[in-house]
Image (tube, rainbow, N blue to C red):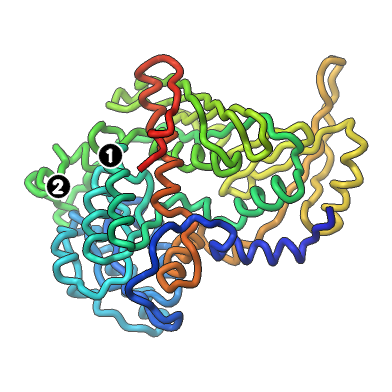
Amino acid sequence: MEYNRRDFLKLAGLAGGGLMMSSSVARAQEKKVAPSEELNIALVGMGAEGEVLLNSLIKIPGIRFRAVCDIWECRRRYARGRILGATAKAGKKTDLKDHLYEDYKDLIANEKDLDGVIIATPDFWHAPQTVDFLKAGVNVYCEKMMSNTVEGARSMVRAARETGKLLQIGHQRKSSPRYHYVRDVLLRKLNLCGQITGANAQWNRAVTKDLTVPEGKAFAISDETLQKYGFENKQKFRNWRWYKGLGGGPISDLGAHQIDIFAYMFGGRPKSVMAGGGNNFYKKDWYDDVMCIYEFEKTYQGFPARAFYQVLTTTSVGGYFEQFFGTDGSIKMSENPALTKIFKERGRPELDAKWEKYVADGLLVKKAAVEVKTEDVRESKPPEEYGFEVDFKGKFIHQPHLENFFNAIRGQEKLNCDGEHAFEAEAAVYKVNEAVAAKKMLEFTDEDFKA
């Protein structure tokens, strides 16, 4: 198969624009936005993830921040300061000063010219906020998980269908040039790994202390305000991911990104999942460590496969990655380029010339050989190590996904992760906590994936 780096660069350009994926099911936009026209954007939720998204947003041209909403005043003011600083540096002006809101409903009532909203609030707020913005005629980019409940997620998809507005879910790997390259080029075009037989992934994170509300008047937030917005106290407000009714625990907070990638790479839905977990360390509502096994009846190659996933919040060893195993090789990848590696099986002469051509064409980079001496004749020789290079052009990892959303509003691209397809992917995540509680393998039905 003739395939060179020039072909890849063309393909990567299409993938980055969402044209590689027929994943947008939203109807045509009622309001057409000219490519040269700035989009009016609001930001709802300025916690840790909101700040991550803001870091990317202020690098994207062609958008105008019209409003910021957060129930915590200090975070509203922080966001305003960051945005004003960035716009001033770019020689632009903004009228954001008087457009700070505590309640997102006030934002909807007062801001009538919004093209899109970025929602990065706690999971239990995602569904009501998304539905209300969609019904107000605003396109929505909402962080994952879609909701803390399956029914909440379904309501978001249905609202997008009914209104015809765009709904992008923040599984940012779906817009990553690196992940497009592995899926569309290495696995499917080149069949680099041969028959895919399995996968594993993990997100390990070191022990962390609970977040607190800092001392001082500038950080004050009243109990009345917290309770108005669904938080029993400051502890649950700052650490909502650990509590039932607010979030889904580490398996949804961290695991959702990577479990999504199993189906994305395999090209199919899981048929079952079994899982174990416990809350022995932090002793919160949700499990602090989870391990699970998915069974896939058929991948894009037509064969069955299994995938193992673990999330540990008591060690950082190993970091976070996804790895796909085949008869000819294996691809270990991550949003952290340092953890990305490709391995070719040794003792397969028929592979050598083919892989060396990929190196010559610039599709792979060969790493220095690592020899491991062993007296055990039963042990396979270590595989040869390769890598690949994809230029992110100085962009943060969330930036291409946000750009895809804005370009879809302009009618230039299709969404890379619309609500319909995000729901299918997240259905596999919701089932894990059920499987831990049930202490047995659970089967998926077609209804589990339907919104």
Which of the 4 quarters of the picture holds residue 300? top right
Q: Judge by depth and name the residue closer to the eye, 79 or 343.
A: 343
Determine the secondary structure under disc 1. Answer: helix
Determine the secondary structure under disc 2. Answer: loop
Q: Amino acid at mark 1?
A: Glu
- Please determine whether, in this image, residue 428 is positioned above or below residue 13: above
Which of the 4 quarters of the picture holds residue 284? top left
Q: Tell me which label, 1 or 2, sits earlier in the chain.
A: 1
Q: Residue at x 36, y 44 (%)?
A: 145
The C terminus: image quadrant: top left
- The residue wearing badge 2 is 229
Image location (x, y in percent) of residue 158: 30, 50
- The residue wearing badge 1 is 151
Q: Residue at x 41, y 21 (%)?
A: 277
Image location (x, y in percent) of residue 170: 42, 52
- In the shown orientation, is residue 158 left or right of residue 401? left
Image location (x, y in percent) of residue 439: 40, 15
Find the distance from the CA under tag 1 to the CA under tag 2: 20 Å
Q: Residues within 10 Å of mark 2 (few under 14, many from 20)?
A: few
* Discs 1/2, front: 1
Image location (x, y in percent) of residue 56: 44, 63
